[in-house]
Image (cartoon, rainbow, N blue to C red):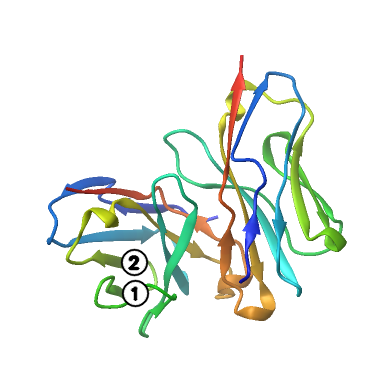
Amino acid sequence: SAVISQKPSRDICQRGTSLTIQCQVDSQVTMMFWYRQQPGQSLTLIATANQGSEATYESGFVIDKFPISRPNLTFSTLTVSNMSPEDSSIYLCSVSPAGGLGFTDTQYFGPGTRLTVL
Amino acid sequence: AQSVSQHNHHVILSEAASLELGCNYSYGGTVNLFWYVQYPGQHLQLLLKYFSGDPLVKGIKGFEAEFIKSKFSFNLRKPSVQWSDTAEYFCAVTDLGQGGKLIFGQGTELSVKP
């Protein structure tokens, strides 16, 4: 498995502002993923972040709202832009460490970032 | 739309009771199946997984799950729960023929009374 850390662990933000969430992994991985877990709901995939290429976004999520960076094989950031109260969620990153198999292998999750937007 | 269904939103059991949490998925092709657990205040952890082979898989902490392909099910079981099993349990499926995204069920909150 991989050890994943996220910063910040939680934050309270004002509407209209942006927050960048960092995800750090203790080993090099090809694919990293960003999920959202809205209150009382399950996890929803936001996007897949591959090193050296643009992130691939799922239906309902757009780059202008959730820009992602993936500068190297151990780090990624997700920015939640122009926030509204509806963005209040837990944001999680995950990795699939085994040889770049990505979706076909086990994903391991970070501790999450709990975001509250006022 | 492809989906994963967990039948029970909240399950309350007494210690030593047996547990079975239902999970059904709607994909028709080859799938990988997972159960994740989220203990209070902790992050999501892998409980067990099925890729191929023996459809009865054993995970950590005495949990097991059975893949029944004909029923599109992957139910989680434990013969005797403990108070420390109190957590939220998520079933997740990747459909290898459809890009393989990990799709989560809605989760089942398990409360075990001491």
Q: Position of residue A22 (x, y in %)?
A: 28, 60
Q: Is residue A73 above or below residue B19?
A: below
Q: Is residue A89 visible?
A: yes
Q: Position of residue B76 (x, y in %)?
A: 73, 43
Which of the labelled discs sits on residue A72, or is there none?
1
Circles 2 and 1: CB atoms closer than 8 Å: yes
Extreme residue toward the bottom, this view:
A53
Q: Where does the N terminus of chain B fall, quadrant-wise?
A: bottom right
Task: Kindly identify the residue that appears in the image at 84 percent across and 62 percent down.
Answer: B69
Q: Is residue A37 left or right of residue B98?
A: left
Count of marks, rendered view: 2
Q: What residue type is disc 1 on?
A: Asn
Q: Is residue A28 visible?
A: no
Q: Position of residue A41 (x, y in %)?
A: 46, 49
Q: Is residue B98 left or right of residue B72?
A: left
Residue A35, by quadrant, is: bottom left
Q: What residue type is disc 2 on?
A: Phe
User: Callout 2: 10 Å neighbours few (<14), some, many (20+)?
Assistant: many
Task: Kindly identify the residue that appears in the image at 12 percent across and 61 percent down.
Answer: A16
Task: Kindly identify the residue that appears in the image at 75 percent across and 22 percent down.
Answer: B17
Subunit that carries the residue with mark 2 = A
Q: Position of residue A25 (x, y in %)?
A: 40, 60
**Residue toward you, B17 or A76:** B17
User: Callout 1: 10 Å neighbours few (<14), some, many (20+)?
Assistant: few
Q: Is residue A47 above or below residue B54?
A: below
Which of the labelled discs sits on residue A75, or is there none?
2
